[in-house]
Structure formats: structure tokens, C-alpha cells
Image (cartoon, grey):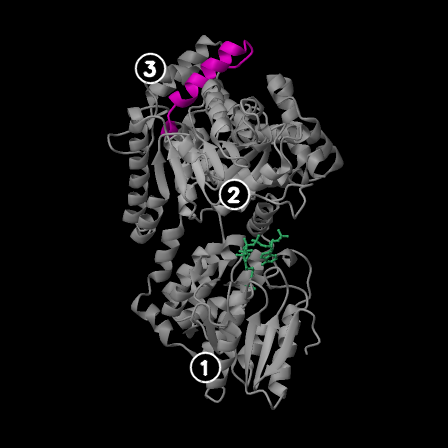
Amino acid sequence: MSDSPVVRFEVEDGVGVITVDYPPVNALGPGVPEGIIAAVERGEADPAVRAMVLIGAGRSFIAGADIRRFGTPRPKPARRTYDVLDASAKPVVAAIHGYALGGGLENALACHYRVAVPSAKLGLPEVLIGILPGGGGTQRLPRLVGPKAAMEMIVSGRHAPAPEAKRLGILDHLVEEGEDLRGAAIAYAKRVADLRPLPRVRDRTERLAEAAADPGMFDAMRAAIARKARNQKAPYHCIACVEAAVTQPFEEGLRTERRLFEELENADEARALRYAFFAEREVAKIPGLPKDLPLPEIRSAAVVGAGTMGGGIAMSLADHGIPVKLLDASPEALAKGLGRIRDNYAVSVKRGSLAQADMDRRLPLIEPVETYEAIADCDVVIEAAFEQMPIKKEVFARLDAAMKPGALLLTNTSALDIDAIAGATKRPEMVAGAHFFAPANVMKLLEVVEGAKTAPATMAAAMKLGRAIGKISAYAGNSDGFVANRTRVPFNIEQGLMVEEGALPEQIDRVMVEFGYPMGPFAVNDMSGLDVSYQTRKRRAAADPNYRTLPITDRLVEMGRKGQKTGAGWYRYEKGDRTPHPDPEVHRIIKEVAAGMGIEQRGFTDEEILHRLLFSSVNEACKILEEGKALRASDIDVMWLNGFGFPRYRGGLMFWADGIGAREVYNRVSAWHQRYGARWAPSALLREVAESGGLLREAKSAKAR
Ligand code: T1G
């Protein structure tokens, strides 16, 4: 038996089996690398051992370095597992199931052979947390699959299914699905035990020759990623490392990899992306919910409303194998909705992002129905009808009458009161909000909204359903706009008011694109349509005399300038072209309306624009946490990353604000409060964090403390 609690060593039939056992994903945590090295040395020293197998216990091979240890002081190991495995005098076979990622795959690449089950996933995802494969992956992978394929995998960070890894040349053998991996790997090890020379990946250079035939591949990749990798270093360092694998001897290439890795590990980009990684896992946890809460199994679903959102939600369910009945009272709406779903899938197939076989498997899972009786037996129903309370109440009254006991009754409303909707049923404990973001089959964020009477099991089941359909479920309390959209309201207001004060749409858009957004907010408004919010503003202004309307936006809508769909909005568009062009007509309208409002226009610095927009949302986020309508500031960051396209390498709204400092944010908010009045009143929580010198990203509501 081995002397390491996280790495076991057993000899079976002349094969030394090294088992990593460090739940939950066999990360290379404390003691794991040391245990692997000790086990290899034991195998080498034991004359009874002819070959070795490296395998993971539990659900996975090795999922990579322990990310929690990055950014913390840690001793530089005298020897690394990659070097010890590579130098072993006896063959080592990596036996892969579950995930072989990052340092996990790099350990496998340092072995002499690699076998896997077909369901395994392999990848070097380090770039997704702002670093690069630092265990020799950038030097060994190109030697196995060629520099171009290696660069694509390393720069994208994607997981490759085992069959593809076999085709690429990473794997030597695919174990039959259902066959015992350990047994198969031992048998493989016995077959190769005496083969010499040992096939060390470092010695295989034939595939590197591909770069000679295509020397421009590295610059081509740099050009290809330029838009998505804007303001980031890691993707470019990944390319440089693969280039070094082609241009430098192996040992020198390793030194290049180490040097570039060390440049990244503690850079802002890596710290922000590591934070985002863990925040997206923390968001799944609702404090106080017992771990073993019995939850209803979701085997079938229904969606009420075959509109754009209903169709997208139905696709999300079908995409993950859940049969879904799509209910709409109008046969025409149903036909139109199904046609839209079919077209969406067909576009993905045409683009190559979806296989025809997947489309053929998913479409039949979506069954159109016209009666509530037809959905009565579904385990969950998600309402996506018109965003008007009377309609929601009628739908939920009918669901209450039709649905079987225990069915989850979820509403996709984006802002309406969950309690009022639940009140239309006799089972409010089964009602919660499931707020999808458009397009529902694409956007990962799902706000799960708790009503006053929602049962804990209903919340847990809805959060779990979100994860089951590939969403990031985030808790939201019941208030107007819930959490994500509510934090965006001040942003939208400041955006409109700064234009009245003299900032131009194109300046504001440029600032936000340079900050890292894919599009500026005015260009986004033009894309979604300026008339969409026009009615909401009129409704709110009618209900609230203090409501601040946006006369410039209203004027554009009233002139028919509704955005891209009418060829003009904040920008002018050439026919058939979506490129926004600044429009002097808009500048004239801005000056005219501002003059009519008696507003003295002025210039703006880029910094003021950025801070006016984002600090207003930071302040609102603090208010939401104070009210207990969100659990954690990091949850709000997860919402901004996955709902609003906030640049991921900046970590999220609150993480980014910490880079400026809560004190500075509070001072600016207070100054704008003096200048602009109540809408800038600083939240008490913001003041508390500022005064305590704490971090905004660590703020929590009372519920989550
Ligand atoms: N380090 C530390 N903790 C990790 C971890 C890791 N690498 N991977 C997962 N966890 C924790 C996670 O926080 C969660 O904790 C639990 O495990 C389950 O994770 C040298 C430098 C493997 C695909 O980037 O992609 O190797 O919330 O909820 O959905 O070159 O975890 O339960 O307390 O995500 O089944 C490279 C990151 C590291 C892989 C499984 N490796 N992990 O997904 O479970 S850098 C990665 C994942 C590196 C080398 C470099 C996923 C997963 P908790 P989970 P899952």
C-alpha cells in the first residue's frame, strides 16, 4: 500500500498501479504531486514491476492543478511529476476517464502511453483562467497532434472528447465503453512492458514539421483571436509557447513556457478569471438549504407560450434531452413558434455549430400542444406568456387547476411580482421565478426568483433544473427587476442622461467597447429596438410623477427611429448593413431637446463616462444586498458576466470596482449625490465597505452570512 493518503500504489500482475484519490476532481492538490513522484520511484525500484498505470479514483482522472493555490505563496517543487514520469525507465500508461484537464492532461502527456474511455474529456483550459499550460503541455501537445491543432486546443481551452483525442493522436487506445478501464489499462501496460525505446513525447518531432509548411500559422492565429482576446495577454502567450515548441529545443521550450506562465499567474487577468471560476461555483449554493433535501426528478417539462422566449426555453430543455410540451392556445402562434425553433436549429447546423443528427434528435422532443390537460403530467412548467399581470394570473390559475401535485410552477417573467402570480394558485409554495435572458437557448444566466411562499425544495429544484440545462442558476429575491436587470437600470439612466448633458452616443459606445464590451450600449439599444422600453417608460411615468423619462430616446422612437430594424436609431445604418454610423441628425436632436430642457451641454472624459455608468450599478448592487434580494456580491458579478457581456477578464462589476477601491467609489457616488440628487444617494453598505477598507466582491446579504 502507498504511504500517501491521496495517492495509492499497488502492484498487480507485474504492473504498478498509481491511483490518485483527491476528491472531488483529483486536482493536483497538496500531497498529490509528491505522491505521484513517490509512487513512480517505488515502481521503478521494484523489480517485480515491469510497467505502471496512472489512474484517478472516483469520477475523473486528474482535473489539473489546484486552482485555489494560485496566487498564494507556494514552494517551487524540486522535481515535477511531468519530468519524473517522462524520465521513468519503465513505461507508464495514463488511464483516463472523466476529465484529463490542464496539469492532468500534462501528466498524461508525460506518460509513455494514454488510454481512455470514450466518454472522457481532455483539454488544456488554462487560458480560461488567464494562464497557460505550465506543465509542458505547450511543448508536448504540438509533438503529438501538430502545432496547428495544439494551438487551437490551447488557445480555445476547449475540452476534446476522447474519440477526437484519439483521432488527433493524443490517445493510443480507446477502451470499449463499459469495459473496466483499470483492467484494460493493466492489460495494455503488460503488452507494452518490454517495448523499447520508450515512446517519450518529447522525442517525437515529426509533427512539428507542419509549421515549416505553414509558417504563417502563428500570426494567422493572432489575427483570428484579436477581437475576442482584446486587452488580454494569456491567449497570445499560449501562441508564443506553441511557436517555441517549433522553434526551440524541448528544454528551451520548457523554459519559455515557464517564463511566460510566471508572467501571467498573478496578473490582473488571471486573478479576475480565477475569481470568476469560483464565483460561478459559489452561485449554485443557497445557504441554509439542507444538502440532502429530497428534490423532484425532472423527466418532462412544459412551456406555456410559443413566443420567442418560450421557444428558446423549449430549446434549452430539448438541448439537454428533456422532453418538452410547448403549449399555446393559438394554433397559428404554435406553428410560428415551432417554425422559429426549427429555423434556429437549422441556422446552427448551417453554421456548423450543431450536427444535423443533434437537430434531428432534439426537434422531436418538442411537442406542440393546445390544452392544459395535455401538460398536466409534466414535472415542471415554465410560463413564458405575455408580460402582463392579468395574463400571468390567468395562466397560473389554469396551471393550478391542471397540473399534477408536486409539479414545479415557474414563471419567466422579467420583472413582475412573483407573489402576485403565486397568489393566483392554491400552491404558492410550488411557484418560483425562472428568468431566462434572451436568447433563452443561448444566454447562460438564469435568475431563480424566490417568492414569499416559495418552498426551499422548489428553489433548490429550480436551481438544479437550470444547471441541468446548461445554465448558471443564480438566486434572486422578489423585487422590481429582480437582481440583474435592477442593477442595470441606473446604468441605462446615466447612459441617457449623459447624452442630454453633452456626451455623444458614439463616445459612450467607444468607451465601453475599449473597456471590453463586444458592443456599446447605444448600438445594443439599436439592435434590440428603442421602442421596446418606450412603452415601459410611458407606463412608469404615468404611474410615478417623479419618474425620470428619457425625452431624447422618446423623440427618436416617435420619429420612427427605432434602431436597426428601421435603418436608423441612435445611429444611421446602410441598407443590409448593421454597421452603426454616427448621425448628425441625432446630434441635432440631442442639442434641440437638451436646449428645450434648459440643460447646458458640456464635454465628458472617458473616465467619467465609465464611472458614471458602472458606479451607478455598483451602488444599486449594494442596495440590493442590503435588502437581502441577492445573496452575494459575487453572484451579481456572475450575472454581469453571463447576462450582460461584462468582460470576463475583469472579473465582474464588483471585482472590477475593487480595483478602484470602495473608498474611491463611495467618494464619487457621494459627489454625484450632491450634484445630481437622490438617484445617487450612496447605499449604506457601500459606505460600510468603504469605511472598513473591505472588498465589495466579498459583500454578502444577511441571508448569506
Ligand atoms: N482546482 C481546485 N478546485 C477545483 C478544480 C481545480 N482545478 N476543478 C474543480 N474544482 C472544484 C470546484 O471549485 C468545485 O468545488 C468542485 O471542484 C466541483 O467542480 C499546471 C496550471 C473538472 C470540468 O481549469 O473545469 O492545471 O464548489 O462544480 O461541473 O498547466 O471543475 O464543490 O467547493 O466545476 O463536474 C486547469 C477546472 C487548472 C479545470 C468538473 N484545470 N475545473 O466540472 O464540477 S490550471 C481546470 C473544471 C493547471 C497546469 C495548469 C470543472 C470540471 P465546490 P465543478 P463539474
Any mark on residue 199, and which?
Answer: 1
> Closer to the observer: label 1 or label 2?
2
Tell me if the residue at label 3 has its CB under 8 Å from ligand 1.
no
x, y percent for residue 120: 47, 64
Work out whether 312 lies above or below 297: above
Above-or-below relation of 294 to 265: above
Q: Quadrant of the N terminus?
A: bottom right
Vertical placement of 623 versus 470: above or below? above
Q: Position of residue 500 (x, y in %)?
A: 47, 18
Asked whether 244 or 633 is in front, the reply is 633
In three-dimensional space, the C-alpha distance between marks 1 and 2, rounded to whole angstroms, equals: 46 Å
Label 1 close to label 2 by CB (< 8 Å):
no
Q: Is residue 653 visible?
A: no
* Residue at x 37%, y 17% (from the top left corner): 556
Q: Give, as a single range, the part of the protein colored magenta.
A: 526-548
Q: Find numbered disc 1 in the image and state the secondary structure of the residue it sits on.
A: loop
Q: Nearer the viewer, residue 96 or 563?
A: 96
Q: Residue 441 location, x and y as percent?
A: 41, 40
x and y, in percent, of residue 435 in the image? 50, 33
Q: Which residue is mark 3?
A: 559
Tell me: 664 left or right of 209.
Answer: right
Q: State whether label 1 is within 8 Å of ligand 1.
A: no
Q: Which mark is residue 465?
A: 2
**Quadrant of the image occupied by residue 5:** bottom right
Q: Are marks 1 and 3 in contact (CB under 8 Å)?
A: no
Residue that sits furthest to the right in the current view: 692
